Image (spheres, rainbow, N blue to C red):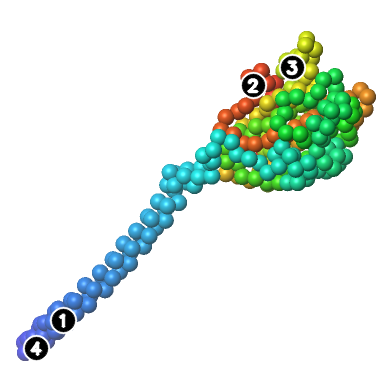
Amino acid sequence: MDKKIGFAVGGAIIIVLILIALFSSKSGPTSFMFSTKSTSVNTTASTISTVMTASTTSPTTTVLTTSCISQSSETYIYNGNFDTGTYEGWNATGLGFDNAPFNITKANSEGNYYGYPWSNYVGSYVATTYQGGFVRQVGNLTSDPFEVVQPYLNFRLISPQNNKLYIEILHDGNPEIIAHFNTYSVPSIQNGNNTSQSTFVNASIPISTLLCQNVSIRIVADVVGTIATKNYYIAAGDFYMGKTATAPSSLASNITITPVVP
């Protein structure tokens, strides 16, 4: 019985020694396998960290968002002053703006104005619902899309205060800004006479919230021409983007800008 126990103990010792030898001989590969797994985990963690940093770093996003800003003080909008004599780059719907811009140089030579010649405008052509002392029917005039690269849209305008005469800034076809003006409230006097109905006024719309976005300008005239509404016309042109607003402070208090909430 003692011999069996001794044999068993001896056998167990031999097995333990064999196992130790086996593990010792495979220590290299075991260490390599652990190292490979560790490297894989570390690499993955590093990759995730890199992705998260790239996607959440505010300065990078800011730079990309504002990279479109023009270094010039003024940025041209295609056919923004209608100098082509056509609505090239614009789309007219309805009868309000006719099929071509109004030639104010010719109109002045023919006496086609209210009381006094058209003044304070750059160029000869303007988009307007005025026609020979009357107002045309309703209509819209929409520019082709352009990228906002300046904080202000500047232009020249004649428009009485009327909730059916306004200018919109469209983004993805939807109005983001609706601006109503009352240029008749800005004193325009010649020889003691009020010339507001034929004097263009500098106007501005802040568009910095749409920087680097593609937008369109839409001039809206929903007034139906009658004798009673003959003064309710809108005339606009000389559109361009600028770093500063050109509108006088007297006009700023008479503009209502309504950002449209999505």
Quadrant (top left, top right, bottom left, bottom right) of the N terminus? bottom left
Asked which quadrant contains residue 33, the reply is bottom left
Residue 248's disc is 2
Q: Quadrant of the C terminus?
A: top right
User: Which residue carries the number 1 mark?
Assistant: 25
The residue at the point 16 percent across, 81 percent down is: 25
Q: Position of residue 22 (x, y in %)?
A: 17, 82
Q: In this view, does 158 lie above or below 7?
A: above
Q: Which mark is residue 188?
A: 3
* Residue 82 visible: yes
Residue matched to label 4: 7
Q: Are marks 3 and 4 in contact (CB under 8 Å)?
A: no
The Cα atoms of the two marked residues, 1 and 4, are separated by 27 Å
Q: Cα distance, mark 4 to mark 2?
A: 111 Å
Q: Which is closer to the viewer, label 1 or label 2?
A: 2
Mark closer to the observer (1, 4): 1
Left or right: 235 with respect to 262?
right
The amino acid pointed to by label 4 is: Phe
Alpha carbon of mark 1 to alpha carbon of mark 2: how far?
Answer: 89 Å
The reply to whether the C-beta atoms of the residues labelled 3 and 1 are less than 8 Å apart is: no
Mark 4 falls on what kind of element?
helix
Label 2, secondary structure: give it. Answer: loop
Say few, some or many: other residues with alpha carbon within 10 Å of mark 1 (under 14 / 14 to 19 / 20 or more).
few
